[in-house]
Amino acid sequence: MNLRNGTGSKKDMGQVFVVTSGKGGVGKTTATASIGAALALKGKRTLVIDADIGLRNLDVILGLENRIVFNLVDVARDVCKPTQAVVKSKKSANLFLLPASQTDEKDAVSEDDFCKVMDLYRREYHFILVDCPAGIEQGFKNACAGADEALLVTTPEISAIRDADRVIGLLSARSIESSLIINRIDFDMVRRGDMLSVDDVQDILGIDLIGVVERDENIIVAANCGEPVVYNTKSKAGPAFSKIAARMCGENVPMDDFGGSGFWERLGRRIGLA
Amino acid sequence: MHSVFEFFKTRLCGGGRESKNEAKSRLQFVLVQDRTGLNNEDMVSFKCELVKVIERYFVIDKQGFDVSYQREGASTTLLINSPVVVRRQDIPDREVEAKSRRRGKGRKKAKTRAAGSSASETVSEKSPESVTGTGASATEPKVAV
């Protein structure tokens, strides 16, 4: 694990993952909330940080919007103690949120401020997930500043993949390794040949895959209720995010068989054709 | 056998043209421009100049000439595929020998600079006589702004 900005020994440091995508609306915030909740369910003390200053949303996805007193900008400016700004989840004793400021501008904090804030929390948590704003401007640079690794969220769409490719380049220039999350895939469309498959996306982007999340209406339902989808174990997306969390903990969770799982492929495999 | 199977699959499942293939080829095209920082016009002149250089030494099959790009981690590999019909006979032998001697020393690396990023080029080691289709590859560190 690459802990670049820390000041203590590796043993007592949390891992900081930036959740990023380039393009907006691909599911970064949902992924951050869901994976954070899944890590907490596994007993890992997890802090999710909303780095989208001025457009915060992680609080509503987690159902914690009524509990916010201080925020990330307050911590960076020493207005409050680091512990005062953190909001504890209603559902889990291990999940915590550091909200973004809703009234400040994106450039209210610098990259150095972010590194400082990460170092304040690193020792207290096993995992820190930073929900990065869309784009590749200051907000992105800030969110990456204290990160050890990246979770790159993309959908199997041409625009999302193009932006993801750009972000991979920017991350590798910062020596941050990225793992790929393919979100909102529709296997019926993949079978029809109308959506890029998991293999296609992986071929194009060329980074390690950490998880695949199917398109699932339960995501909207979960957001409506302010409860991360991982608590819904009957949904498609919930267990998919839990698997990503398990892989982040170093567990060997095999990937499902995504490619060619349609009727014809199955038949073909059975009779030895495909 | 596989293609027969694909044929039945597309016919019986009512699939005609698969739109994902279009997405894939368009993406690959646009990513080449994004990754290399070369626009379409630059790319065309790059290919023309490559052909000119290769033609000084070989008779090539221009139809099969192709430049493609492959992502490998943080870098993009430039794959130049140029089917060689025959080595040009009008090159003085001494010049050819000198070239193969240089190639024999191992991979030749040339540093170039373009658009604010560094690019290194690796030239194929194969001797001209044994080449039926040469592949030269160049890796370019991801352009980072």
Image: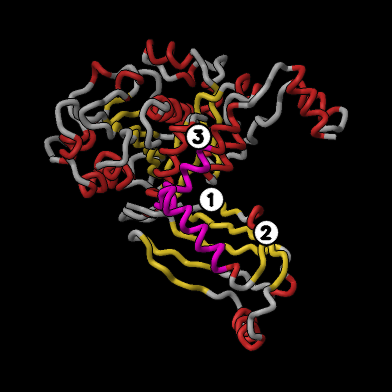
> The disc numbered 3 marks a residue on which chain?
A
Question: In the image, residue B34 lies at what x, y percent?
Answer: 42, 47
> The disc numbered 1 marks a residue on which chain?
B
Q: Mark 1 points at which residue?
A: B71
Question: Which is more toward the observer, A56 or A200?
Answer: A200
Circle nearer the viewer, 1 or 2 = 2
Q: In this view, does A97 lie to the left or right of B62?
A: left
**Type of amino acid at the residue the image marks with label 1:** Arg
Q: Mark 2 points at which residue?
A: B61
**Dot 3 and dot 2 within a common chain:** no
Q: Is residue B125 left or right of residue A140?
A: right
Start and end of the magenta stretch? B26-53
Circle nearer the viewer, 3 or 2 = 2
Asked if the residue at tag 3 contacts the one at tag 1, i.e. Cβ–Cβ closer than 8 Å, the answer is: no
**Type of amino acid at the residue the image marks with label 2:** Asp
Asked if the residue at tag 2 contacts the one at tag 3, i.e. Cβ–Cβ closer than 8 Å, the answer is: no
Q: Which of marks 1 and 2 is nearer the N terminus?
A: 2
